[in-house]
Image (cartoon, rainbow, N blue to C red):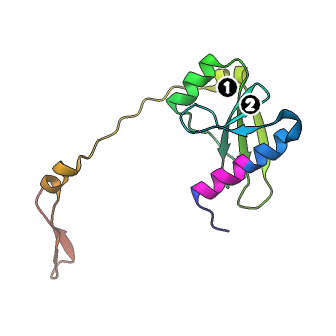
């Protein structure tokens, strides 16, 4: 079964909402808070995957800020969504901090105005089967 990232995210949130149940009164939170669900004083970031096993999850800066501010912060990881047999892992704040590894990344901003300067027109050399272009 092919699922988009958005579908996986929605299904993972639905699993967590059901798990939290009516007793805790879970509510989805708008983007940008560093967590997806507030549930009876718990702040929950939801991570979902279609895979059965998961080696790591990405933790955005907003999530890290919320982790530092909220004592009752959790990450709920929902796996195996593509098979329709979700498995839920609840990771508390202390365990998150214990396993959290900082990873610095760099990005190249590609301004639209500059892109035309960088564009290369590729020509196929029919005799050699290779592409040629300026570098």
- In this view, 62 is above or below 2: above
In the picture, the quarter occupied by the C terminus is bottom left
Residue 49 to residue 71: above or below: below
- 128 left or right of 21 in image: left
Q: Position of residue 122 (x, y in %)?
A: 17, 69
Mainly helix, strand or loop, the magenta region?
A: helix
Q: Which residues are magenta?
A: 6-13
Position of 132 with respect to 9 (left or right) is left
Q: Are marks 2 and 1 in contact (CB under 8 Å)?
A: yes
Q: Say above or below: 44 vs 123.
A: above
Q: Which residue is mark 1?
A: 96
According to the image, label 2 marks what residue? 91
Q: Residue at x 17, y 78 (%)?
A: 128
Residue 72 colored in magenta in the image? no
Task: Note whether residue 27 is visible.
Answer: yes
* Image location (x, y in percent) of residue 111: 23, 46
Q: Is residue 51 visible?
A: no
Q: Which residue corresponds to the image point at 73% horizontal and 22% vertical from the top-left?
A: 72
Numbered badge on residue 46: none
SS assignment at label 1: helix
Q: Is residue 11 magenta?
A: yes
């Amino acid at each position: 079964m092919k699922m988009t990232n958005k579908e996986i995210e929605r299904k993972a949130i639905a699993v967590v909402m059901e798990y939290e149940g009516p007793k805790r009164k879970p509510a989805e939170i708008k983007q940008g808070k560093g967590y997806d669900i507030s549930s009876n004083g718990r702040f929950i970031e939801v991570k979902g995957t279609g895979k059965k096993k998961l080696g790591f999850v990405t933790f955005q800066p907003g999530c890290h800020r919320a982790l530092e501010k909220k004592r009752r912060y959790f990450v709920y990881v929902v796996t195996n969504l593509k098979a329709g047999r979700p498995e839920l892992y609840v990771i508390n704040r202390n365990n998150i901090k214990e396993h959290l590894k900082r990873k610095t990344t760099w990005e190249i901003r590609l301004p639209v105005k500059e892109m035309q300067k960088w564009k290369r027109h590729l020509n196929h050399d029919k005799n050699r089967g290779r592409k040629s272009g300026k570098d």
